[in-house]
Image (cartoon, rainbow, N blue to C red):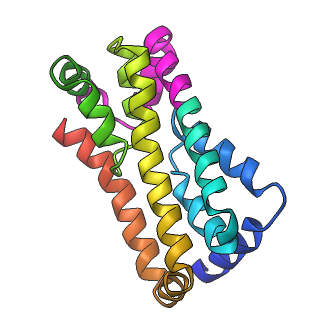
Amino acid sequence: MIRLLYDWVIRLAGHRHAIPAMGAVSFVESSFFPIPPDVMLVPMVLARRDRAFTIATVCTVCSVLGGLLGYAIGYYLFETIGAWVVKLYNLQGALENFRAGFERYGVWIILIKGLTPIPYKLVTIASGAAHFDLFTFVWASIVTRGIRFFAVAALLWKYGEPIRAFLEKRLTLITWLFLIALVGGFVAFRYLF
């Protein structure tokens, strides 16, 4: 099953609408969608290594724009949509601690959390809810998301075939590790913040 899904994603990665689709996923992931854009970024770069940095650029720009939507949800709509998103992931208590952390650590929270498996949508919504400085939020988001997506793209561009062989040989294990990291990010946010 995982192999069929992987092969399907690799085929889609070469489709002419693959980059806009990945951009849409990057956008919505930063505000409410649970699946990170890496799920599309990795196979797309493996399928088109010559476009690795274009793909990373689209992923970064769309993620930051989606982060602005998440920020707006936290800033203007926290009591309705923002609270619903937080409740959907059962992270109400963690969000309060996270919001309080902005008073002490501000930009460092955005820079560090944007690189980790902790869901970026929670960072964006919390930033808006805490009324964190918008200019600082934008530049920190560009830095952290850019580092994350360009690092992945650069590694895949440079070492694409060995990485592809490694992924294909250990696909089930890597899928499970990815799912554990994704769930672990939500759990970490809930219990550590």
| Residue 85 against residue 58 in the figure, above or below | above
On the picture, is 184 further left or further right than 145? left
> Is residue 87 at all visible to an observer of this figure?
no
In terms of depth relative to the viewer, which is nearer, 8 or 166?
166
Residue in view at x 66 percent, y 65 percent: 44
Q: Which of the 4 image quarters holds residue 86?
A: top left
Residue in view at x 24 percent, y 47 percent: 188
| Residue 61 against residue 57 in the figure, above or below | above
Q: Give the image location of residue 50, x and y in percent.
A: 68, 69
Q: Give the image location of residue 156, x and y in percent.
A: 52, 71
Query: Which corner quadrant holds the C terminus?
Result: top left
Q: Give the image location of residue 187, x and y in percent.
A: 27, 48
Magenta stretch containing residue 69, yes or no? yes
| Residue 139 against residue 37 in the figure, above or below | above
On the picture, is 45 further left or further right than 114? right
In terms of depth relative to the viewer, which is nearer, 88 or 158?
158
Residue in view at x 64 percent, y 55 percent: 55
What is the chief secondary structure element of the magenta stretch?
A: helix
Residue in view at x 62 percent, y 67 percent: 45
In terms of depth relative to the viewer, which is nearer, 124 or 189?
124
Region rendered in magenta? 67-95
Tell how many labels.
Answer: 0
> Is residue 127 at all visible to an observer of this figure?
yes
Q: Give the image location of residue 184, x and y in percent.
A: 30, 55
Q: Which of the 4 image quarters holds residue 47?
A: bottom right
On the picture, is 175 further left or further right than 191? right
Query: Which corner quadrant holds the N terminus?
Result: bottom right
Magenta stretch containing residue 164, yes or no? no
